[in-house]
């Protein structure tokens, strides 16, 4: 496992990290990233298309993580349920994972809320987004997101399954990232 705390020590320069993990360990990799981010005192914004935010909240809490600084842009729960869940705390729900416009708007609003607070945005997961989006659309969005995070001096993690990525997409993602790590 890469030293997440070492990666996070260079906060403030708009760093982007492509975090790769085995497909069967993505949820644990998500937790490890959020745990490291929160332990450094950063606010975490999780853009999730892979796991519903209520499930992630329960997992974080069960492992003793304080989730008061963890916020969610949830692109799967409303799509899967057809309506909003009862747990709305710290969450914005997007109609479907392919609606990147709403994801971008929600992220911009969240980033504006506390502009002086150290913030880390975690995208979970790129592989799941590829189910709902063509590769060129996802690539454009990740380029937009990388530029936004750099300009706002925020940190970003793009979580992906390491052996399930198209090699050409993997190369493009690495060009938008400052570092690629394995978790």
Image (cartoon, rainbow, N blue to C red):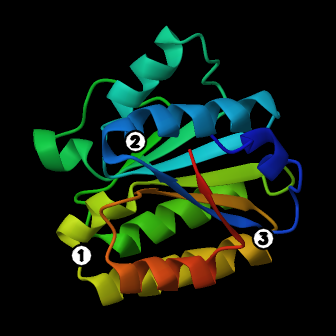
Residue on which the image places disc 1: 133
| Residue 28: quadrant of the picture | top left
* Mark 2 / mark 1, whichever is N-terminal: 2
Q: Is residue 69 above or below residue 76?
A: above
- Left or right: 108 with respect to 48? right
Q: Circle 3 — which element?
A: loop
Q: Residues within 10 Å of mark 2 (few under 14, many from 20)?
A: many
**How far is disc 3 from disc 2 in space, using C-alphas?**
27 Å
Q: Is residue 134 left or right of residue 112?
A: left
Vertical arrangement, residue 62 with respect to residue 80, above or below? above
Q: Residue at x 60, y 24 (%)?
A: 67
State the residue in front, 33 or 137.
33
Q: Which quadrant holds the C terminus?
A: top right
Q: Nearer the viewer, mark 1 or mark 3?
A: 1
Of circles 3 and 2, which is in front?
A: 2
Residue drawn at (65%, 29%) of the image: 35
Q: Which sits earlier in the primary sequence, circle 3 or circle 2?
A: 2
Q: Position of residue 44 (x, y in %)?
A: 64, 43
Q: Give the image location of residue 149, x and y in percent.
A: 69, 70
- Callout 3 environment at 10 Å: few (<14), some (14 to 19), or many (20+)? some
Where disc 2 sits, the SS reads helix
Give the Cα separation between the discs numbered 2 and 1.
20 Å
Residue ID for mark 2: 26
């Amino acid at each position: 496992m890469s030293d997440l705390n070492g990666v996070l020590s260079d906060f403030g320069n708009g760093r982007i990290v492509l975090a790769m993990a085995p497909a069967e360990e993505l949820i644990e990799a998500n937790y490890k990233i959020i745990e490291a981010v929160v332990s450094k005192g950063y606010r975490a914004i999780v853009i999730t298309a892979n796991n519903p935010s209520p499930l992630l909240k329960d997992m974080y809490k069960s492992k003793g993580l304080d989730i008061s600084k963890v916020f969610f842009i949830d692109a799967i729960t409303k799509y899967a349920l057809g309506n909003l869940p009862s747990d709305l705390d710290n969450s914005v729900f997007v109609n479907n994972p392919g609606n990147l416009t709403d994801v971008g708007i929600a992220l911009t609003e969240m980033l504006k809320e506390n502009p002086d607070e150290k913030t880390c945005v975690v995208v979970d997961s790129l592989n799941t987004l590829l189910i709902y989006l063509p590769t060129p659309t996802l690539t454009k969005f990740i380029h937009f997101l990388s530029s936004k995070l750099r300009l706002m001096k925020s940190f970003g993690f793009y979580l992906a399954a390491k052996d399930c990525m198209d090699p050409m997409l993997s190369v493009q993602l690495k060009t938008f990232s400052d570092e690629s790590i394995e978790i």
